[in-house]
Image (cartoon, rainbow, N blue to C red):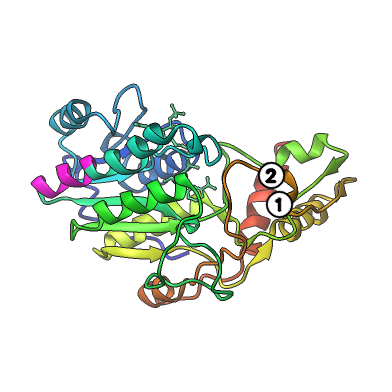
Amino acid sequence: MTRTRFSELSKPASPVLIAGAGGMLAWDLNRTFSDLVGQQSTIALSRAELDIANPESVEAAFQIYQPKVVINAAAYTQVDKAETERDLALAGNCTGPALLAEACRRRGIAFVHYSTDQVFDGSLGRPQREDDRPNPLNWYAGSKLEGEKKVLTYDQSLVFRVQWLYGEKKDRFSPLRQKEVFSPFADQFGAPTWTKEIAEITAEMLSKKESGLFHLSYDDYASWADVFDFVKQTWKLQLKLEPQITAKLNLPAKRPLFSVLSNAKLSSVLGRSMGSWKKPLGEFLQRVGARN
Ligand SMILES: NC(=O)c1ccc[n+]([C@@H]2O[C@H](COP(=O)([O-])OP(=O)(O)OC[C@H]3O[C@@H](n4cnc5c(N)ncnc54)[C@H](OP(=O)(O)O)[C@@H]3O)[C@@H](O)[C@H]2O)c1
């Protein structure tokens, strides 16, 4: 990965403020930006320190820290619970991002936000582009779509749609070592995405002063069953995989099945291909596996 030149953000008086500390993506954002601009210039605030859906809390954080860049990793992410906690989902995924974007607009500073592949219904049958028409199938996705629309009214906003995150903060693969049987979805297609890679690309795109909507994904895709088989093979686990169909679980929130994101726009701006999802996942499994 190309190392980002970060001269402007490396001034001590140019803090990067990360909302949603405690979350999976925020963990890697904090680590990556601390490496790039220094720990003193990287401020990661938990919900107790910055409630993005509370206007007074947002204003206080901006007053105290005087950020020059704001990255929002906070979100309401419980897809099934959102069906019944509709107001909470809207507060975290729409009101909060809109308040942060507005506070950034008033100060003329860059704002980064993350959305989801689930804004699409998956019916296109080909990788979905930024200009394809969204059609959310569940409340969580609807609240994320409303949030990204509000955020994108500010022209210094950078919004990444991402999917199937994994990272060291909430490692979804290591628990497999204790299982004898596991049933991944065979009919959901996408690409697992390492939060470390999202953090590094966020930094790279900020240094290029990019704005607008981007799909952050890989050049290929797989089913969850393929992904877990890759993990099983890489770690040589004695695990029995029994793939299942999504509909069988009767989950409260409907999910898109073919949820693949086209990364053509991002690749063209970065000037390189994103490669296969297998490469970063292999690296992650080696890193995490070495500790177990
Ligand atoms: N995980 C995925 O597979 C996935 C897929 C597609 C898109 N995304 C998007 O990627 C981004 C990062 O996701 P993630 O997996 O890192 O999420 P996560 O691990 O669930 O972290 C979200 C964090 O936001 C906090 N939060 C919720 N409401 C808040 C509020 N009002 N004010 C401040 N903090 C608040 C949560 O705190 P509490 O714990 O206190 O609630 C939690 O620490 C989100 O925008 C998400 O929608 C994720």
Instruction: Determine the residue positioned at 71% across, 52% down.
Output: 247
Q: Which mark is residue 247?
A: 1
x 22%, y 26%: residue? 57
Q: Is residue 67 above or below residue 233?
A: above
Q: Position of residue 151 (x, y in %)?
A: 25, 52
First to last magenta residue range:
99-107
- Residue 100 drawn in magenta: yes
**Taking 229 as reference, is 18 above or below it?**
above
Provide the major secondary structure of the magenta segment: helix
Q: Is residue 135 magenta?
A: no
Tag 2: amino acid: Asn
User: Quick one: label 1, few (<14), some, or many (20+) residues within 10 Å?
Assistant: few
Real-space Cα separation, disc 1 to disc 2, in angstroms: 5 Å
Q: Are marks 1 and 2 in contact (CB under 8 Å)?
A: yes
Q: Is residue 90 left or right of residue 191?
A: left
Q: Mark 2 sits on what residue?
A: 250
